Amino acid sequence: TESIQLKDPAIESSVVSATPMPSTANVATGEPSSETPVQSPAVAPVSEPKPEVSEPVPAEQPEKQEPPQSPVSSAESAQVSTPGAPLSIPPDAAEGPAEFLNGNYRAGAGIMDAKTSRPLRLEYAFEKGQGKVTIRRPDGVSCSGAINAAMNGGNLALNSQAQASCTDGSGYDMPQVSCKPGAQSVADCNGNYGNTQFPMSMRRE
């Protein structure tokens, strides 16, 4: 008798499905298969907050700050050219024309009008010992004349060349002035009107 083998399609299919198949479930579910290396969610490399030193940009050079200039060195301010400085006679002043004498000077207290005994203002303008003297009277009249300065025997003499001409048409006799070196070279000056002598200070304007 022949053995009859029944082939049931349902059974056969179950056998077929029992065969291990490459797992597609992972693909279907979107889960990474065991073969693919697990990649952590692409975390963008968080650039660690670099201390904001971004390339040492040459710090905005605070516009070349030039060293603060000192107002004027004390040595310079002590020079004779300083306004208000007293007339001084250099210790090495040579005999003859006083070429060291330059600039404008004003004669201070002590100068009086010979006729009225009222105070006068005397102003001198020198260039290498030659110049002009102007006298201003209390009545507003001014008188000017030529003058020269010369060293004689260690003393400085300011000599008026002639009678000064005044704005009112008159003439005026100027005092003769003689100065000698005083303390620290400061000139010690005296004015002379005829036989009358009086002390006077000379300061740079």
Image: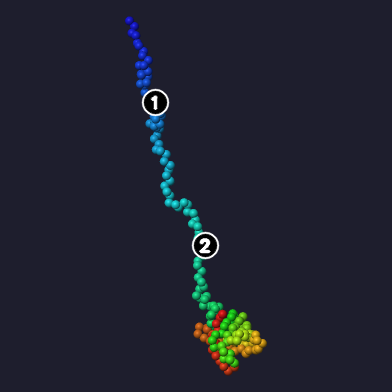
Is residue 14 toward the left or the right of residue 195 in the image?
A: left
Crowding at label 2, few (<14), some or many (≥20) Cα neighbours within 10 Å? few
- Applied colour scheme: rainbow
Task: Estimate the spatial distance between the alpha carbons at disc 2 and disc 1, rounded to whole Å.
Answer: 77 Å
Q: Which mark is residue 171?
A: none
Residue 76 spot, x, y in % from top left:
52, 75
Mark 2 lies on residue: 64
Residue 23 spot, x, y in % from top left:
38, 27
Is residue 145 toward the left or the right of residue 62 in the image?
A: right
Residue 139 spot, x, y in % from top left:
60, 86
Q: Residue at x 51, y 73 (%)?
A: 72
Q: Residue at x 42, y 39 (%)?
A: 42
Mark 1 lies on residue: 22
Residue 77, can we see it? yes
Q: Residue at x 42, y 44 (%)?
A: 46
Quarter of the figure with the N terminus: top left
Q: Residue at x 51, y 65 (%)?
A: 66
